[in-house]
Image (cartoon, rainbow, N blue to C red):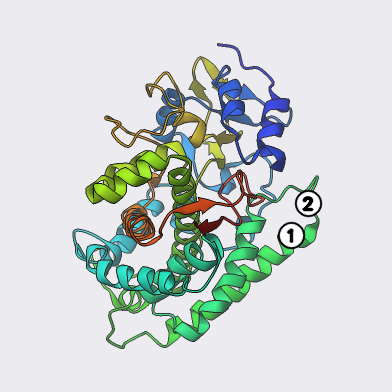
Amino acid sequence: MTTTHTPDTLHRILDHSSRADPYPLYAELRKTPVALQEDGSYVISTYRELTGILHDPHLSSDVRHLSRPMPAAEAHTTPSFINLDPPEHDRLRRLAMRDFGPPHTPGLVTGMEPDLTAIVNGLIDDFAGKERIDIVDDFAYPFPVTVICHLLGVPREDEPRFHVWVNAIVDSLDYNPKTDPKEKLDNGVQARNDLTQYLGGLLEQRHGRPGEDLLTRMANDDGPDGRMTDDEIVSTAHLLLIAGHETTVNLITNGMLTLLRHPQILQRLRDEPDLIVPLVEELLRYEPPVHIIPWRAAYSDITVADTVIPKGSQIMLMLASGSRDPARFHDPDRFNPDRQDNQHLGFGSGIHLCFGGPMARLETQTALSALVRRLERPVLVTDPPPYRPSPILRGPIHLHIEQS
């Protein structure tokens, strides 16, 4: 298969005017599974090719393997393990998982369910007396940051500072030097520096002291792989905060929007609460929070769909396109919580499969279940709602509803 230049399709996908419904453009993009762009990068958009390359050991997540510089905020910071390759990636991920999940801390996520329920119900209690509710500002945004700050051991009074930092960092993720003011990148870099300094200060207080929060456990845990350095702990905390917060905000908001557009399924969820588990899995396929992995690099020449991608090339992975690929999923543009064999790409695949996925799933299940149960006849005010700028982490910036 010969690669084809499809700059117009990609540019339209990245343009904010397409944010509300990029899926027809993804279908157009899938006509060329591996598409060469004018700048020498490659775009991969079909399920088979995406899953194949995500498991290819010749694919690098380390920006240093790109043949041209990466003009993003991540290039200015100590990388988290999501931006590293084996064996260093594997070592840091194992160290992080010792304190975040099974087998060493198997009850961490499930044990938080009562706290999650209490936080969600408290936020919904605050809806009382409001004629109009913004699911983003009033609910989906404060919920995960409260959870992550609780996990890390951040004092509640400092949580508002995290909102400012997260906004600036996420806004800089899709920085384009050709179209965006440099202030956008500078604000992201400054926010990362401020967050790093703050987390470093918290970490200093944790060394040699007992405690159950994640920072304390990582600071004092000596396992078979040794102990993380302070820089590695802070970069892991960065990852939890940014990736864990923004993906969950978008997943909850996209989920509520999807249910409001499918009132029969919303009512079914009220009647069948156990439907929430497969429903969230279908949501991760149908309206995922992460649409694009904006770059990966080729260690060496890679052949994908009969196309040779040269060593050092930037590779863009269109995950949301793959999860709507009709070659893999029957009737892919239909939201069907009864779908079987739903191996979506909502949390990626391969060695970089989202390690916070279990937490995001539980948060979203808890949030949507409570909203559906407690909101009486919710009505969407604007459809489509306004969307955030980023095509990478896609979700509404506001989702206003009223109760009829």
Q: Residue at x 38, y 24 (%)?
A: 329
Q: Residue furthest front?
A: 404
Q: Is residue 73 left or right of residue 218?
A: right
Q: Amino acid at mark 2?
A: Asp
Q: Position of residue 50 (x, y in %)?
A: 45, 29
Name the one closer to the observer, 9 or 56. 9
Quadrant hosting residue 214: bottom left
Q: How many marks can you see? A: 2
**Residue under circle 2?**
180
Can residue 349 be seen from the camera position used here?
no
In the displayed structure, would residue 184 be above or below residue 258?
A: below
In the displayed structure, would residue 364 be above or below residue 16?
A: below
Q: Position of residue 346 (x, y in %)?
A: 42, 42
Can residue 69 be seen from the camera position used here?
yes
The CA span between labels 2 and 1 is 7 Å
Q: Amino acid at mark 1?
A: Lys
Q: Residue at x 36, y 70 (%)?
A: 121
Q: Residue furthest top?
A: 1
* Disc 2 element: loop
Label 1 crowd bin: few (<14), some (14–19), many (20+), radius 10 Å: some
Which label belongs to residue 394? none
Q: Residue at x 45, y 51 (%)?
A: 256
In the displayed structure, would residue 95 be above or below residue 86?
A: below
Q: Position of residue 120 (x, y in %)?
A: 37, 68
* Disc 1 element: helix
The quarter in which the N terminus is drawn is: top right
**Residue under circle 1?**
184
Q: Position of residue 262 (x, y in %)?
A: 43, 39
Label 2 crowd bin: few (<14), some (14–19), many (20+), radius 10 Å: few
Name the one closer to the observer, 211 or 94. 211
Asked if labels 1 and 2 touch by Cβ distance under 8 angstroms, the answer is yes
Q: Residue at x 79, y 58 (%)?
A: 182
